[in-house]
Amino acid sequence: MSASVAMLVALAAAIIPSGAHAQEARDFPSQHGTLRVETLATGLAHPWSVEALPDGGLIVSERPGRLRIVRAGKVSKPLTGVPKVVAQDQGGLLDIALDPGFAENRTLYLTFSASGKGGAGTAVVRAKLSRDERGLTEVKELFRMKKFTRRGQHFGSRIAIAPDGSLFFGIGDRGERDRAQNPRDHAGAILHINADGSIPGSNPYQGGTGGLAEIWSKGHRNPQGIAFDPKDGTLLTVEHGARGGDEINNPKAGHNYGWPVITYGKDYSGAEIGEGTAKEGLDQPLFYWDPSIAPGALAVYRGKMFPEWDGNLLVAALKYQLLARLERDDSGAIGSEERLFDGEFGRIRDVVVAPDGALLMVTDEDNGAVLRVSRGATQ
């Protein structure tokens, strides 16, 4: 084989994954019985997000900038119409969120690292999935953070859709800590916009007085998980600490969650960060990890398959390659933690609850996979 032909074969392999439906199923013990994990698809390049389509298919983002459809274990060619992304370091194509009316309007939302003056920054677009599922149409940018830099870290960014259809999403401090305390900077914040990109009246700086109008809360290091509890509408986030100090928070309008003034983590050098773990006027996390587990996503379980998990929080973890299940009491306080699949599948980047109550996960690897977690056979 000539060098040029070999190069073309390698390029094709990178663009069109194997998409093998591996038909693999492995059982794992848990505190509430056996869990079965099936590999639905493989050959994906650093998949970042997965969503279940109404008819049973899946839509998956790959960080290099591709969207694909998975059906019966087969992975589609990349969809057309996806915005151009800055796919370097932690940046690229990130989250997917389906509009509540997706079955009728085909509308979805994406977050990604966009190119602009000064480097790159986080952006949000709205688009429609074509009926033939070959591409996106009517792509419209709804939000773009104001200050771009050449830093390659802490873009965030997942989306949670509120009961009223508005969008909440997070952006990290972009590797520049003090930006998280500046109310006139989108970095280090939870943002809130309407589905058309306009500003909700409930935002604390609505009108631009005192801070940027899109900002909901500040003091976040790098929030990569965000979800509403379907039962009571509580907004919850999970964010990366430094060396320790990963946090779960309940972001409230106008509140400040401390980074980098207060934190339960230390710098990677071992040095102290900020002023300690508490300070008046700065909110405490609901829960924190030390050492860090590097959380990638958060889901609140309200499904039918595992009724014993009702109200539990599920957190995908990259560093320890696990799924953390956190129990909550009636007040919402977080209690015990169970760690599942520790080191078995690689870096778990996303976890979502499918319509049937099973879990869907993706692994952030060169040869990434889509996994399904269901109840295993009883002994």
Image (cartoon, rainbow, N blue to C red):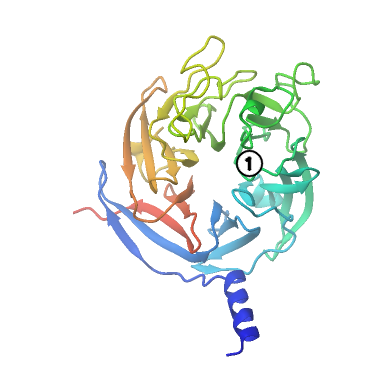
Q: Is residue 298 left or right of residue 92?
A: left
Residue farthest bottom in this picture: 1
Is residue 353 visible in this depiction of the protein?
A: no
* CA neighbours of label 1 inside 10 A, class few (<14), some (14 to 19), many (20+): many
Q: Is 152 or 249 nearer to us in this picture?
A: 152
Q: Is 296 or 377 nearer to us in this picture?
A: 296
Q: Is residue 125 above or below residue 162?
A: below
Residue 10 falls in image quadrant: bottom right
* Pointer 1 residue: 155
Q: Is residue 165 left or right of residue 303?
A: right
Q: Position of residue 146 (x, y in %)?
A: 77, 35
Q: Residue at x 45, y 28 (%)?
A: 265
Residue farthest left in this picture: 379
Q: Is 232 or 199 nearer to us in this picture?
A: 199
Q: Position of residue 110 (x, y in %)?
A: 67, 48
Is residue 236 visible in this depiction of the protein?
A: yes
Name the kind of residue labelled 1 in the image: Phe
Q: Position of residue 240 (x, y in %)?
A: 50, 36
Q: Is residue 85 above or below residue 275?
A: below
